[in-house]
Amino acid sequence: MEQKNYDDPAKSPIIQEIILSNRIGAIAVELAKRLKIDPSRALQLFYQSQTCEDLHNKSTGLYLYGDLYVADEFMREMENKQ
């Protein structure tokens, strides 16, 4: 990945990916608590979800919402699958 010189280092794609990875970890921990499962299993479930795909897709705007909201979205997705 080409690293450009950004006026704001936080806008760097590498930094943005690090921030998103950290957020996904926090979301997985929240899901593990809610579902009473191991965090690694929660992470696996989240990565397989449409919610995770939407979080990575900037056009959905989901990345603008807080981690608890994203966790709520995941829970709704799981409820709708049942």
Image (tube, rainbow, N blue to C red):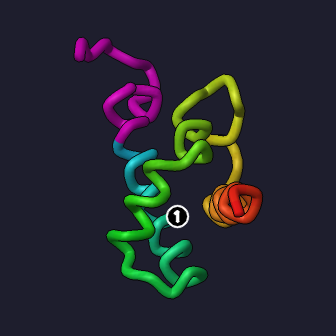
Determine the residue located farthest toward the front in the rendered image: 82
Q: What stretch is highlighted in magenta?
A: 1-17
Is residue 14 covered in magenta?
yes
Q: Position of residue 38 (x, y in %)?
A: 37, 80
Local crowd size for mark 1, using a 10 Å CA cut-off: few (<14), some (14–19), many (≥20): many
Q: Quick check: 79 left or right of 24?
A: right
Question: Does 5 appear above or below 46?
Answer: above
Q: Position of residue 69 (x, y in %)?
A: 72, 60
Does any portion of residue 61 appear in the rendered image? yes
Q: What residue type is labelled 1?
A: Ile
Q: Quick check: 63 left or right of 41?
A: right
Is residue 30 covered in magenta?
no
Task: Write down the quadrant of residue 37 in the picture.
Answer: bottom left
Of the 4 image quadrants, the one containing the N terminus is: top left
User: Which residue is nearer to you in this view: 9 or 36?
Assistant: 36
Identify the element where label 1 is drawn.
helix
Q: Image point 35% across, 44% down: which residue? A: 18
Q: Quick check: 20 left or right of 69?
A: left
Q: Where is residue 3 in the image (x, y as percent from the top left)?
A: 26, 16
Question: Does 33 appear above or below 50?
Answer: below
Q: Image point 54% across, 48% down: which residue? A: 49
Q: Image point 44% across, 35% down: which residue? A: 10
Does any portion of residue 69 appear in the rendered image? no
Q: Quick check: 26 left or right of 44?
A: right
Q: Image point 38% across, 37% down: which residue? A: 17
Residue picked out by circle 1: 27
